[in-house]
């Protein structure tokens, strides 16, 4: 498991890209639902 501290300006897509994982896996594993909260 990877722990990432979300920073202002981060998005699900940018976090996924920076860790070479899919946005869908972040959404699923963190039980997010649309609309995603903005940081």
Image (cartoon, helix red, strand yellow):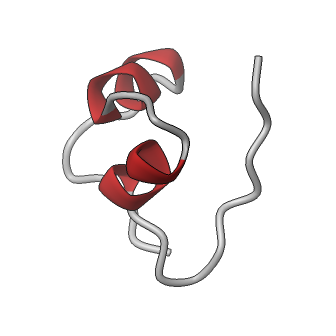
Q: Name the residue rendered at 42%, 43% in the picture.
A: 16
Nearer-the-camera pick, 2 or 19: 19
Q: Is residue 36 above or below residue 28?
A: below
> Farthest left residue?
34
Looking at the rendered image, the quarter that the N terminus falls into is top right
Image: 17 above or below 28: below
Report the side of 14 relative to 9 (left or right).
Answer: left
Q: Residue at x 50, y 52 (%)?
A: 18
Seen at 48% across and 70% down, the residue is: 10
Give how far across and how far down residue 25 sits, in percent. Answer: 39, 20
Q: Position of residue 23 (x, y in %)?
A: 32, 35
Number of numbered tags placed on the structure image: 0
Q: Position of residue 19 (x, y in %)?
A: 55, 41
Q: Where is residue 14 shown, x and y percent of the image?
A: 39, 60
* Residue 38 sits in quarter: bottom left
Q: Check the image and report above or below for 33 versus 15.
A: above
At 53% from the left and 26% from the top, the residue drawn is 30
Left or right: 15, with 14 as reference point: right
Q: Nearer the viewer, residue 30 or 9?
A: 9
List the single residue furthest toward the bottom: 8
């Amino acid at each position: 498991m990877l722990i990432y501290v979300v920073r202002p300006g981060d998005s699900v897509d940018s976090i996924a890209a920076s860790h070479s994982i899919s946005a869908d896996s972040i959404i699923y594993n963190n039980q997010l639902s649309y609309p995603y909260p903005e940081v």
